[in-house]
Amino acid sequence: MNFGKQAVLFLAILQGALAAEKSPVVAKFEMLSGHVQYRLQGGQWKDAKLGLALPAFTELETGPRSKVILVFANGSTLALNSLTSVMLDKYGTGSYGSQVVMSLRSGRLLAKIPKNKNGAQRHHFYVRTPTVVAGVRGTIEEISYSPDRGSEIKMHESGSDVVDRNRAKTLLPQGGQSTANREGAVTADKTARRAQTSTLVSSQVSTAGEAEFSYTSGDFTFSPNSPDFTEFLRIYERFAQDAAAGETLILDKL
Amino acid sequence: MKRGILLFLLTAGFLLAADKPREMERYRQIAEKPHVTVQDMVDLILMTRGEFEKNHTEAQRFQMARNEGWVKGEPVVLLDRGALAYALILNYNITRGWLFRLTRWNRYALRDVQEAGVLSPRYSAGNSVSGAQLVGAINAAEEYKTEKEEWPSRH
């Protein structure tokens, strides 16, 4: 092999290696606070640094008392709270605009997606949790997931579509909140109805339990726990009976 | 003399830097466990309070929690929801019910923590806790505490 061929081969190998090394930048760290780490496609965990470029398939974890803000190439901003674990699954651009797909494994994030001035294009931003897929379109949305509470989605600006694990699609309006866990999804209208429902104390329209609950629910000193209050009254009555009979109260019998 | 000071500063810097990954490694180890122990809960709560690095050994951290009165029993015991609720109620100022105030039992602590929306009401005091559930519970307790503290300024 002559020198020319060797040089061409070397350049071809070098170009291939550089192409493999260089993957498109999806996001950058804009603000860091506390312990934040990332890893690329199952590699070693590394400490995050300001301005560091992240490609797709990057996993991010924030530790206790930590916070991070990421800026995407399309101008979207993502804030991760402490004890949050996410993965940047996909980033793509085209004639449709741009698309970001993320997985939220645990914790809470706040996504701010800019509105696209071009009517034909849109910034699509999807966040997957183990129970829902939330699509964010030109809005500010807060999404959280924990095994106990399931997924909670809150809209701070504009609206969103929410698809739960049964593929049921519901609209989440501005200011609304929706929850999805293993029992199913509580849609925004049901959440709002529950929040706006107040129990009036009246012996005609309320049951004894509802009346007790409404008496204690505004009190921050004691838990608004209705069965707790009922059980306390039961213990008190029993103690009063035992005291009257001259006996000692035995808590194990309760 | 100058070399000695430089060496001391470099060593101190290295030790301080080494603590950060140690905390994250321990956090990740806890989060991935299928069943966590009481020691894991103590470590995670101290991390959120910023006191994990102040106590270098597990024994020191457990003793600190025991002195403050929010853990009972042994560190190697599997954590159940009752013990978790007891620790959360004391660390995150969750509103306490009458029966918890009177008895200090785990079952009443769990009921108050469930009433506050921090833990799911589907479980009882004897159920064990996974790492992901522990992380989620501590996150929820922190949010509850922040919301409660900010309530007067927002209303």
Image (spheres, coloured by chain):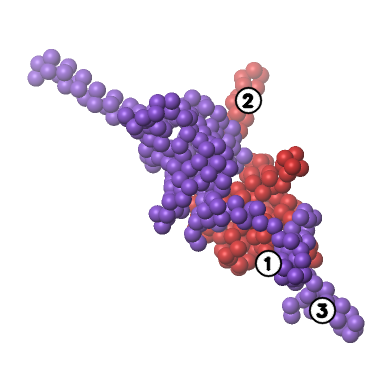
Chain colours: A purple, B red
Q: In the picture shown, does residue B69 fall above or below B49?
A: below
Q: Which mark is residue A238?
A: 3
Label 2 is placed on what type of residue?
Leu
Please indicate whether residue A88 sits to the left or right of residue B88 in the image: left
The residue located at (76%, 55%) in the rendering is: A218
Discs 2, 3: same chain: no
Point out residue A42 in the picture as x, y percentages from the top left corner: 39, 42
Give the distance between the C-alpha atoms of the residues marked 1 and 2, in whole angstroms: 50 Å
Where the C terminus of chain B falls, by quadrant?
A: top right
Question: From where the camera sits, is residue B7 visible?
Answer: yes
Name the residue nearer the viewer: A241 or A95: A95
Residue drawn where x is 50% and y is 31% of the image: A77
Q: Which residue is mark 2?
A: B9
In the rendered image, is residue A130 in sight?
Answer: no
How many residues crowd around disc 1 within 10 Å: few (fewer than 14), some, or many (20 or more)?
many
Which residue in the protein does label 1 denote? Answer: B107
- Which residue is depicted at the point 67% across and 60% down? B115
In front: label 2 or label 3: 3
Crowding at label 2, few (<14), some or many (≥20) Cα neighbours within 10 Å?
few
Side of A87 where A224 appears, left or right: right
Which type of secondary structure does the marked residue at label 2 adopt? helix
Nearest to the observer: residue A47 or residue A85: A85
Q: Quadrant where the N terminus of chain B lies?
A: top right
Q: CA distance from mark 1 to mark 3?
A: 20 Å
| Amino acid on which the number 3 mark rests in the picture | Arg
Say if B127 sits above or below B9 in the image. Answer: below
Q: Which numbered disc, 1 or 3, marks the residue closer to the eye?
A: 3
Marks 2 and 3, how far apart at CA: 67 Å
Which chain contains the residue that carries disc 1? B
